[in-house]
Amino acid sequence: MAMTQRPVRDPVTAQRAQGSFGDSFRSALGPLLFMGPAGFLVVAFFFIPVVIIIAFSLTDMSSSTGFQNWAWVQLENYRKILVHPSSGPILWNTIKYVVLTLSLFNVGMGLVIALLSTHVPRRTGFLFRALWLLPRLTPSVVYVMVWKYIAADAPYGILNQHLLGPLGVKATNWLPAQPWAFVIASNGFIGASFGMIIFTSAIESIPRDYMIAALVDGCSLWQRIRYVILPMIRWPLLFVTTYQTLSLFTSFEQILLLTDGQFGTEVWSLWAYHRALNNYWGNFQWGFGSALAAVLVVIGILMAIVYMRYFRFNELVQEPRIEAL
């Protein structure tokens, strides 16, 4: 019988392999420890609630069934969403609200304010940005009441009394007359302050050598913005656009306080809130409301993927290339 000889392992090779594994573990331990608290918060306050919401969406749970007499209905709630007569108009309202608020205010005005306040004396720019933070710092109820008084009919409305009245425009209650203008503006002034902070920090972090070189080459202000500033702040643009898109899809606080969905301003997240937690009839449809919320989760994930591909996320997170001479 032939005897098979077990290969002899080189002690030096074994020690090197063990050492490389230990080094890899130690190098990965630090980032894991730093990411641990944030990872715990994401799992506890995002992943687990999403799983619970999806589970609820597969049931007929409501105030009529209670928490004991409910039954699994699989995808019935999603079928109801597809055939519901309000799904199309509310989806269109949501898209219109998100696109206009995002482009005009949250990203557009935020970027304009950042550009203006970084091209004026530093103290003036700081004061200008501080004023734009007031809508975000003001309590939501007080902030919305200000907008209601702006739009109110005479003799209380600021818009009628001091702006349009002297021009001969007939006084009216502008909130039901132009509800989307006030919904978008009230949300946009809050969102613009967030983009302003991020964009200002990104612009001020651009090396001054780049700006000086552009000036020496004779670039105009628009050319400096287009060819120097905007390419250098692609990462903040990606972050603000993605974050504010997801925020607008899921937030309804100002709309709830301003119109409560009346005058055709019902959006998807407010529809889910009304069906699940607050409606005139008192029949809280937790299963159907959860299905509406789950649709928002899917839309948010798809939009995040689209943004990452459009902004070339893989190129943004690449390590800098160091060329050895």
Image (cartoon, rainbow, N blue to C red):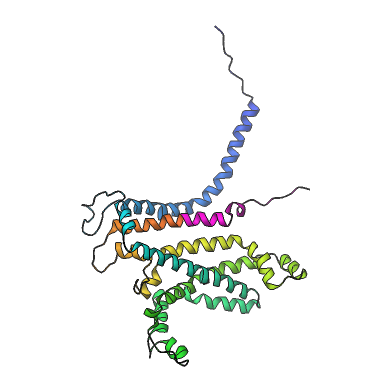
Is 302 displayed left or right of 319 in the figure? left
Q: Residue at x 56, y 75 (%)?
A: 129
User: Which picture quadrant has residue 255?
Assistant: bottom left
Residue 198 lies in magenta, yes or no? no
Q: Residue 86 placed where, x, y %?
A: 33, 64
Q: Residue at x 34, y 52 (%)?
A: 52
Residue 296 visible, this angle: yes
Q: Residue 176 placed where, x, y %?
A: 37, 79
Magenta stretch, residue numbers: 302-324
Q: Residue 304 placed where, x, y %?
A: 50, 56
Relative to 105, is 63 above or below?
above
User: Which picture quadrant has residue 118?
Assistant: bottom right
Quadrant in which the N terminus is drawn: top right
Is 57 displayed left or right of 306 in the figure? left
Residue projecting furthest to the right = 325
User: Which picture quadrant has residue 183?
Assistant: bottom left
- Seen from the viewer's position, the closer of residues 189 and 208 is 189
Relative to 216, is 14 above or below?
above
Q: How many labels does the image show?
A: 0
Residue 251 visible, this angle: no
Q: Which residue is drawn at 61% across and 20% down?
A: 8
